[in-house]
Amino acid sequence: MSEKHENPYKRGDYRSIFAVIKKAQIVTRSAVVLAGGIQGKTEEAAGFTATVLLSPREKSNRGDCRGSISAMGHLYFMEKLPRKEIKGVKEEQKFRLRWRKIALAPRVRGEHVVSEKTATEAKKEMVTA
C-alpha cells in the first residue's frame, strides 16, 4: 500500500546519508551526523550535510520551505516531532521523513526574491545615483 520512493540524490555523500534517513524514517540530527562520520566525513562536514538534509519543511514562515538550495526539498520534507521532557530536560529533536504528495518546483541557483520598493525609496535612489 505504501509507495516506493527513490532516493532523490543521485550520487555522493548526500545519497548515502539520505539512504540511512530513508531506512530509519525517524532520525535525530546527531544520528545523521554519526552516519556522515561513518561515511568518512569530519564531524564539521557531517554537521553541514545534516543541516542540508534536514532543512526541508512542509511549510515555512521564515523562508523557502524547500530548505537549503542543495537539498531536494521539492520532493520531501522533514516533519519535526514533539519533544518529550523528562525531569526538566527535553530530549533531542526528532525528525520524520515525509514525501510531498505533489512535488514543488525545484529550487534554482540565482533565483532571488525582488523586494518591492516604495515610491519614496525609488525616488531617493534615483536622486543619489
Image: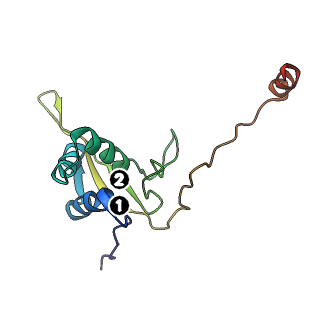
**Element type at marker 1?**
strand
Residue drawn 26% across the image and 61% down it: 16
The quadrant holding residue 4 is bottom left
Q: Between 125 and 117, which is closer to the camera in this rendering?
A: 125
- How is the rendered protein coloured? rainbow
Whether label 2 touches label 1, CB < 8 Å = yes
Report the front residue among 41 and 63: 41
- Taking the view exactly as shown, the residue that stands out farthest to the bottom is 1
Q: Between marks 2 and 1, how big is the CA–CA gap? A: 6 Å
Q: Amino acid at mark 1?
A: Arg
Quadrant where the N terminus sits is bottom left
The residue drawn where x is 22% and y is 40% is: 43
* SS class, disc 2: strand
- Residue 119's x, y, as percent? 85, 29
Q: Which residue is mark 2?
A: 78
- Can you say which quadrant of the picture contains the C terminus? top right
Q: Earlier in the sequence, mark 2 or mark 1?
A: 2
Q: Amino acid at mark 2?
A: Met
